[in-house]
Amino acid sequence: MTDNALTLIPTPDRIAANLESVAQLIDEGGEKNFKLAKRMLGNAAANVRLLFELQTDPETGEFRLQNYGQAWMLADLLQNGKMVPSSYNTPEQVVIGLMKATELGVSPITGLANIMIVNNRPSVWGDLAQALVERSGQVAKQSKEEIGDKPAPGLELSEWPDSYGWRVSTWRKGQDEPYVGEFTVRDARRANLWKKANTPWVPYPNRMLFNRARAFSLRDGFADCLLGMGIVEEQADFQTVPIDLQAHGDSASALPAPDAEPVTEITPPKPEVTELREYPAEEHRPTREIFDEEREKAGIAEDDPNPKLV
């Protein structure tokens, strides 16, 4: 047995293999084996410590998570330092955010700052989505333009024209047609977003119109770069309505009113009952008797080897 294995990059499997080798050396006995086992145990302890230490990228200096244990350690560190964004309510959500950042190829701190838990799903802010798409090298060109009747400066939100909005067109390399996203004041009003209290739609309506248009363009054309994730500016406007299947009494009134009158009772159609036919007794005769009768009518001899009845 050599010490070469001790110099390899530590992984849980390699550490486990080394510990199994230590156990084997102890079972075999002998002073030489005990000395080697002692050295391997010390090396395994160092590797375990290294396994859970936060690593940095040698080129960029950014933290890089190497395993699940490191994600938990960093999550605990950030929570104790009160450096976790407010959308992360539990340590488990922080770990999920860190793992999603690793999947996207961004550093843990940058990932948490730009990944938000919306409706229990991790979503990316629009600026990170734009960065991920541009980093992919698949963007050939992108254009941004205001559309419709532009509102005058200082105009009340209630008076903004429905036609005003933004159009974002993004061309993907190798494709002739762009992915176009549009969002107008009319769309915002239809979605009950316009002048929505306690949201960015009131202080920053123009920016929110642009963010929505850009989100449509990026998600439609570059879902692979975003790993299918939603974009915060869009997902945050969706509201989930919890439905209690056991609701009764006053709790049922909390459910949203349907657009049409519900069907309260479904009456299945009555099955058609087919009247059973009663055959007269003379119709129930032995097959041989019926055959002989038909043979006589056809004038076929009884000893005919191949009778053919029509």
Image (cartoon, rainbow, N blue to C red):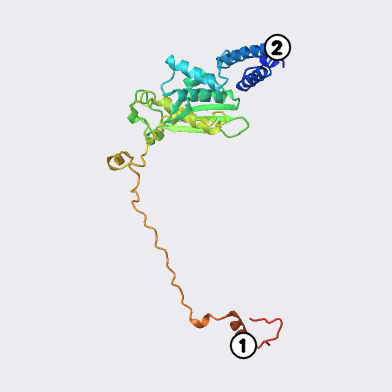
Q: Residue at x 68, y 12 (%)?
A: 36
For disc 2, the neighbor class at 10 Å (few under 14, some 14 to 19, many from 20) is few
- 251 or 48: which is nearer to us? 48
How far is mark 1 from mark 2, CA to CA? Answer: 111 Å
Q: Looking at the picture, which amino acid does disc 2 mark?
A: Lys
- Could you tell whether 53 is left or right of 150 in the image? right
Mark with earlier residue (1, 2): 2
Above or below for 224 versus 40: below
Image quadrant where residue 269 sits: bottom left
Query: Residue 5 in the image: x percent, y percent?
Result: 68, 17
Please tell me how many numbered marks the rendered image carries.
Answer: 2
**Which residue is labeled 1 in the image?**
297
Image quadrant where residue 139 sits: top right
**Which residue is labeled 2 in the image?**
32
Query: Residue 111 in the image: x percent, y percent?
Result: 50, 21
Q: Residue at x 70, y 12 (%)?
A: 32
* Disc 1 versus disc 2: nearer the observer: 2
